[in-house]
Image (cartoon, rainbow, N blue to C red):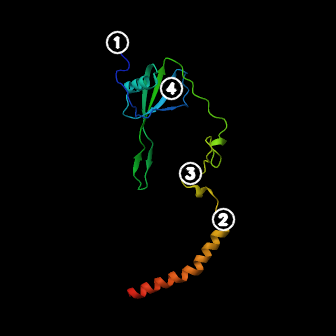
Amino acid sequence: MSKVAGKRLVYFPNIPFILYRGLNLPPNFAAFRVPLNVNKFDVRDYLLHVYNLKVLSVKTNIYQGKLYRDEYGRVRREQATKRAIVEMEEPFLYPKLPEDLREWQAGDTLPDGTSAQTLSRYPKVLEKPDMKSVNEELNKLKDAGFSTSQQKISRLLKSIH
């Protein structure tokens, strides 16, 4: 009986396969983080049909999540993760890491000309406040608003009693 690779066709993949480095693997091996419901045959078919990559073997491991206590003191476990180590016919070399990351730091311009600071969800948080103006505004509020709000509260209390 012969093995036939690639019986399950993958048309529009919606399965996240995360290629990661950090393991000391030979050049013809690659490691992926895959969903828990993906099996070895799915990994092989996915790589064959999406990337046209011939796979010789697939090894999968499931790693338990760490234990921790939540805010109520109950013991919980993080979600488990699954790793697939794939042996390929052709060697795979990871791209080199960029040496200079200053282009992508906050406040600097990105390669398309926009600023990383403008892409922030809360851009004003990155700016340092002028403490003199903040203290002046607080003093104005204390002088003007405190007496009126205190008077309103005392009127409300008198009307209730």
Q: Are marks 2 and 1 in contact (CB under 8 Å)?
A: no
Amino acid found under the numbered disc labelled 1: Ser
**Label 2 to label 3, Cα distance in Å?**
21 Å
- Left or right of 26 in this view: 103: right
Residue 103 drawn above or below residue 158: above
Which is nearer the N-term, disc 4 or disc 1? 1
Residue 73 drawn above or below residue 88: below
Residue 97 location in percent, x, y? 62, 33
Which is nearer the N-term, disc 2 or disc 1? 1
- Left or right of 147 in this view: 78: left
Amino acid found under the numbered disc labelled 4: Ala
Identify the residue position indicated by label 4 in the image: 30
Give the number of the mark in front: 4 or 2: 2
Identify the residue position indicated by label 1 in the image: 2
Give the number of the mark in front: 3 or 1: 3
Residue 4 drawn above or below residue 118: above
- Element at label 3: loop
- Element at label 1: loop
- Left or right of 37 in this view: 91: right
Pointer 3 local density, CA inside 10 Å: few below 14, some 14–19, many at least 20: few
Q: Which image quadrant is residue 101 in? A: top right
**Label 2 to label 1, Cα distance in Å?**
75 Å
**Label 4 to label 1, Cα distance in Å?**
26 Å
**Label 3 to label 1, Cα distance in Å?**
55 Å
Give the number of the mark in front: 2 or 1: 2
Which is nearer the N-term, disc 3 or disc 1? 1
- Element at label 2: loop
The quarter of the rendered structure image containing the C terminus is bottom left
Identify the residue position indicated by label 2 in the image: 130
Q: Are marks 4 and 1 in contact (CB under 8 Å)?
A: no
